[in-house]
Amino acid sequence: MIEKDSRGAGAADGGAGARERAGLLWAPRAWVGNRWCERVVLEAGADGTWQRVEAGVPPPPGASILAGPALPGLVNAHCHAFQRAFAGLAERRQVNQDDFWSWRDSMYRVAGRVGVAQQQAIAAQLYVELLRGGFTHTCEFHYLHHARDAAGGAIAPEASGTPRAMAQAIAAAAGETGMGLTLLPAVYERAGFGQSGPRDDQRRFVADAAAVLRLRDELRADAAVATGAGPKVRVGIALHSLRAATPAAIERLQAGSDDAPIHIHVAEQLQEVDDCLEATGLRPIDWLCRNAALDRRWQLVHATHATTAEIEAVARSGAGVVLCPSTEANLGDGIADLPSWLKHGVALSLGSDSNVTRSALEELRLLEYSQRLARRVRCVAAAPQEFEPSTAERLWSRVLRGGAAAAGFSAWGLQAGARADLLVVDTSAPSLLGIAPSHALDAMVFSSPNRPFRDVLVAGRWVTREHRTPGAAAIAARFAEAMQELWADPS
Ligand SMILES: [Zn+2]
């Protein structure tokens, strides 16, 4: 039984130690300053950041020559790792009308069963897949706070002691695989607007503002003493949603906040918009803009149902928006107003959210295709009038920048001072054969290379080389074992 095994910092150290340092690299082509540049030197320092990025130079002596063009890694700005255990298993109609709310009831049944070791096993498998899919950093929106009791049931919040173990399991999975991580412990207080507490199946999620701020500080203390060679875990804060957090909790959390990111789910579902209107007289994004003092630290996850006035208010605030195209499609949430978000210059990023998809390229493709289907036109995200005619390049540039803000980085991408992350494109993939550099990103997003990245670097260490990820077979075996336990368990 995987639950009884101990897999903590030791496994994380072993994984990171086995990963080779990159040092001095040279790329025939690399994405620098939001465009392709030729003949680029990239030097990663011992601290895991880029010391030197310079285009237009020949390979220096001793440099490793990359086998293909280099792209910066993307931030996965919204993720609930445990939901990876549910991917593909909620596609049978159980009720007369299957929707977000019936899906959520089923998801809660999985959430109720996941233990600490299973949490780590699921997250480790997920991170291997996300790294191969173009994401080198993940923001974990963490609300599965409380561990299970010995009988496998959910524990009453007051009896559960510290909720740190489930978050530590996520950090250990990141250390094991080399994934960069921003942990976002979330406030969760109640079942909905006007409710005094949670439903029974939400009890593992309960944490008030004081508990979240304490957990933030404890997780930062853990990160400060972590000895692994992987990137240092960053820790921000989150509010599950306006329906699950009271205005008083939002105020208390904000009073205890610092420079780190603050994430919140908002306006994902029309029912949530209606409930918020009924309870407060305002739509959720409008309520946030008027009451939460939004600024660049804030990340509005989904923001699917937004009026033009709300989009303008978010733009004025400096807050970012996290779009989760595959999850929003899977759950039937609706379609975001992408052209308006782009037009108003709001920082946009991508989230894998429920993890039905673990590929940045698939998320970008679906983001654009949902717009084409709804509007019956092509190349919606492109902006020829702004000299950004490539759909994929414009989206890539935007989510690169927005993702950095969502994860709390002031510098990101292929530039000196940023963390030394990159993806080496596999130009032998059939859909990229003979493609000119000017069209490479469009082909990667819209022509579906099945193994797009041959090498992946995080914080100056190779986590994947020639499509091979050290430790991936053992991680997959543990994941399969965890899945069998979760789905065999009748509780
Ligand atoms: Zn979410």
Image: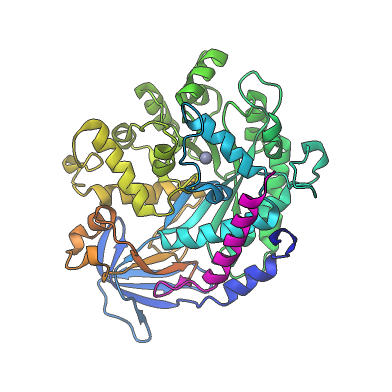
The percent position of residue 449, horizontal first and vertical second, equals: 29, 61
235 vs 317: above or below: below
> Which residue shows up at 24% across the image and 56% down it?
447
The percent position of residue 360, horizontal first and vertical second, equals: 38, 53
184 vs 23: above or below: above
Does residue 47 appear in the picture of this structure? no
Looking at the image, which residue sits at the far bottom? 61
Identify the colour scheme used: rainbow
Q: Looking at the image, which is closer to me, 138 or 268?
A: 268
Q: Is residue 32 left or right of residue 230?
A: left
The percent position of residue 162, horizontal first and vertical second, equals: 78, 47
Q: Looking at the image, which is closer to me, 37 or 338?
A: 338
196 vs 301: above or below: above
The percent position of residue 423, horizontal first and vertical second, equals: 38, 65
Quarter in which the N terminus is drawn: bottom right
Q: Is residue 393 left or right of residue 47?
A: left
262 vs 396: above or below: above
Toward which corner of the image does residue 237 lie, by quadrant?
Answer: top right
Q: Looking at the image, which is closer to me, 327 or 439?
A: 327
Does residue 38 appear in the picture of this structure? yes
> Which residue shows up at 72% across the image and 58% down it?
3
Quarter in which the C terminus is drawn: top right
Which stretch appears magenta?
A: 463-491
Query: Does the magenta run of residues contain 59?
Result: no
Query: Does the magenta run of residues contain 467?
Result: yes
Toward which corner of the image does residue 375 lie, by quadrant?
Answer: top left
> Which residue shows up at 31% across the image and 76% down it?
67
